[in-house]
């Protein structure tokens, strides 16, 4: 049996496994993906002609409405927690060196405070293993935080059950198609009636009959209340969000926050070296490219206020770091200079570096110190982000991910079986790796592809463009608003919770905690709306539990006859609402394809170059 990994000195009276030493050669960092992420954050896009142009209002609105999913939030919370630890290491090292004091990373209160945050513990369950040297209390704190993550998975499941069913249908039938594609829209059209019918059968059959018998001696109003509550996925989401918050709070109270072990200090220094190297690679790429520097500045200014920018709009931090890159004779010396500049920016009174040795007070200047730290995170988020490199680690998986993986496994099992029904019907086709598509098929696919119609609109006629844009607008509204009402209400509440944390408490915002607070409040609101309004109206009882009849001639639910039974489907249900929008969206996309065959296609030609002074402010990375 092989022995333990070799240990190396960390320079801090600690040792760490040799594999924890950072090596740029083993880094999965992609400069190309990083460039694309910076361009996206700067609200620019590439039209395919070598230029970069400012996004239009519709494009920015679509990005804002769609927001991000739970997986992206998990990654961002984990990445930012690691970046905050790196920030604490750099600032402590810089301050200690100027004061002539030894650097004590394992015992630094600031570093420990950043390490034991929920955003860090939750997505690093391996820390509960004894080999990382945490105390028993801290190991329990990691486990409690992980249980909070599992509870949050139930929250996400309860907040959007229709979304999960649609995702499963995509995995089964159109896994390779973009959601904008006409085929995907037909899949949604086929799935939504099934979802609406299942929910209707579930609520009427299970809750109407089962609870009706169980509570036949209970007052009718109470019975209605309980039925409404039991039917509400939002109530389940709210309760599980509260459970997640309680487990997170228990994790915070359980932790002892003792000195960090040598294994942990080696790990966090590995991450610090990784962040510094990636920052160097990005800055070295843009240093002699004015347009690239402008794009990078625009991306950073989304998070850095004007007070911390030069007259020309370039953030002070970026300007100082670019000076290091230009002045350094070698990569090692440039990285050392970058680390010193970051340390100076994070700790000294003036962000310009003109007050060397005059440090901000850790207590009196907590708000300023946190603001500077957030500025650095704005930069590190551009070099470490889920958009920069794929990281489908199981640490980020919740209940939804496991259900989706199960659906994918079932699909593969069906496809591997001979003569399966899905294969016969052609809904879930086998992968044809040995049958490359012909050139004619590729051109046809490009011509009639929804993605190409939307991103290369100049290749199509006005009717085709208009129909495709209207279809996409309806699709975004359907999936970003109707399907995500809980999420859209959660966003401002979570943002407010984070704002209060940073402005009032002067502590870094915990993304997992803020979003759990947002989910708890938003889901509670929707549970009340479901119970007091929607379910009562859908059952024909009017507003609230026993309130007056609704002022409408249309009675809910709409009873659809199926032979000897009738299925009641409320048009107030999410699936039914989406169906009403999905139908015209699919029709318009189909009409766009017909219009394309009539109007013609200009071919796969590049967009004309934007002239200097254009309102789209053309730039070039090179």
Image: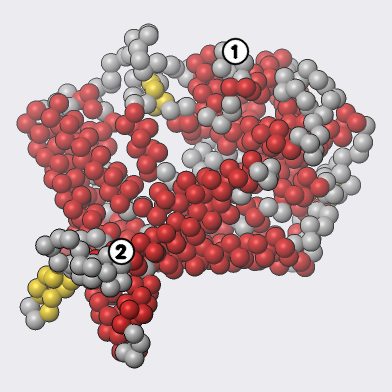
Given residues 226 and 174, the one toward you in this image is 226
- What scheme was used to colour the molecule? secondary structure
Q: How many marks?
A: 2
For the view shown, which residue lies furthest in the front direction?
Answer: 548
Given residues 88 and 285, the one toward you in this image is 88
- Answer with left or right where residue 25 lies relative to residue 6: left
Q: Quadrant of residue 420?
A: bottom left
Q: Residue at x 77, y 50 (%)?
A: 112
Q: Residue 35, how many percent across, how many down? A: 50, 29
Residue marked by disc 1: 311
Q: Residue at x 9, y 81 (%)?
A: 564
Foreground tag (1 vs 2): 2
Establish if 51 lies above or below 345. above
For the view shown, which residue lies furthest in the bottom direction?
Answer: 217
Residue marked by disc 2: 533
Q: Residue at x 32, y 61 (%)?
A: 162
Q: Residue 554, how many percent across, how many down? A: 13, 63
Mark 1 crowdedness (10 Å alpha carbons): few <14, some 14-19, many ≥20: few
Given residues 86 and 203, the one toward you in this image is 203
């Amino acid at each position: 049996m092989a022995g333990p990994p070799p240990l190396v000195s960390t320079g801090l009276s600690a040792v760490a496994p040799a594999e924890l030493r950072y090596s740029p050669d083993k880094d999965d960092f992609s400069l190309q993906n990083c460039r694309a992420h910076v361009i996206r954050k700067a609200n620019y896009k590439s039209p395919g002609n070598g230029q970069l142009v400012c996004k239009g209002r519709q494009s920015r609105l679509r990005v804002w409405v769609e927001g991000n999913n739970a997986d992206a939030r998990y990654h961002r919370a984990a990445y930012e927690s690691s970046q905050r630890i790196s920030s604490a290491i750099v600032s402590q090292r810089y301050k200690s060196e100027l004061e002539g004091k030894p650097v004590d990373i394992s015992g630094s209160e600031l570093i420990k405070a950043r390490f034991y945050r929920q955003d860090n513990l939750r997505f690093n369950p391996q820390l509960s293993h004894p080999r990382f040297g945490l105390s028993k209390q801290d190991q329990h704190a990691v486990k409690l935080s992980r249980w909070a993550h599992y509870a949050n998975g139930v929250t996400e499941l309860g907040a959007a059950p229709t979304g999960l069913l649609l995702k499963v249908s995509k995995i089964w039938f159109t896994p390779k198609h973009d959601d904008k594609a006409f085929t995907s829209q037909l899949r949604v059209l086929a799935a939504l009636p099934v979802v609406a019918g299942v929910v209707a059968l579930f609520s009427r059959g299970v809750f109407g009959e089962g609870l009706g018998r169980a509570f036949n001696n209970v007052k009718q109003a109470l019975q209605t209340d309980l039925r409404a509550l039991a039917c509400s996925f939002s109530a389940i989401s709210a309760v599980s969000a509260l459970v997640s918050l309680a487990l997170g709070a228990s994790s915070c109270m359980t932790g002892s926050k003792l000195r960090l072990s040598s294994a942990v200090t080696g790990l966090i220094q590995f991450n610090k070296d990784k962040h510094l190297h990636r920052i160097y690679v990005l800055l070295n790429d843009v240093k002699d490219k004015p347009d690239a520097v402008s794009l990078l500045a625009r991306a950073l200014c989304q998070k850095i206020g004007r007070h911390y920018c030069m007259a020309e709009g370039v953030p002070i931090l970026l300007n100082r770091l670019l000076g290091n890159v230009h002045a350094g004779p070698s990569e090692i010396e440039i990285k050392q200079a970058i680390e010193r500049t970051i340390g100076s920016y994070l700790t000294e009174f003036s962000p310009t570096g003109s007050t060397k040795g005059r440090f901000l007070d850790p207590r009196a200047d907590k708000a300023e110190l946190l603001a500077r730290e957030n500025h650095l995170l704005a930069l590190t988020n551009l070099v470490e982000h889920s958009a920069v490199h794929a990281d489908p680690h199981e640490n980020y998986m919740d209940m939804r991910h496991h259900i989706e993986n199960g659906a994918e496994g079932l699909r593969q099992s069906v496809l591997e079986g001979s003569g399966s029904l899905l294969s016969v019907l052609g809904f879930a086709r086998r992968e044809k790796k040995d049958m490359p598509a012909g050139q004619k098929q590729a051109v046809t696919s490009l011509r009639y592809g929804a993605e190409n119609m939307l991103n290369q609109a100049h290749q199509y006629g006005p009717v085709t463009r208009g129909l495709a844009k209207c279809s996409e607008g309806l699709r975004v509204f359907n999936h970003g608003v109707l399907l995500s009402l809980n999420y859209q209400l959660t966003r401002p509440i979570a943002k407010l919770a984070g704002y209060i944390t940073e402005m009032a408490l002067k502590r870094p915002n915990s993304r997992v905690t803020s979003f759990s607070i947002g989910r708890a409040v938003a889901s509670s609101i929707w549970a009340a709306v479901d119970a007091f309004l929607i379910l009562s109206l859908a059952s024909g009882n009017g507003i609230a539990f026993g309130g007056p009849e609704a002022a409408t001639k249309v009675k809910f639910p709409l009873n659809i006859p199926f032979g000897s039974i009738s299925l009641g489907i409320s048009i107030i249900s999410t699936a039914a609402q989406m169906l009403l929008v999905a139908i015209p969206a699919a029709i318009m996309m189909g009409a766009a394809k017909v219009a394309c065959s009539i109007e013609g296609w200009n071919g796969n030609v590049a967009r004309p170059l934007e002239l200097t002074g254009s309102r789209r402010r053309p730039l070039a990375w090179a």
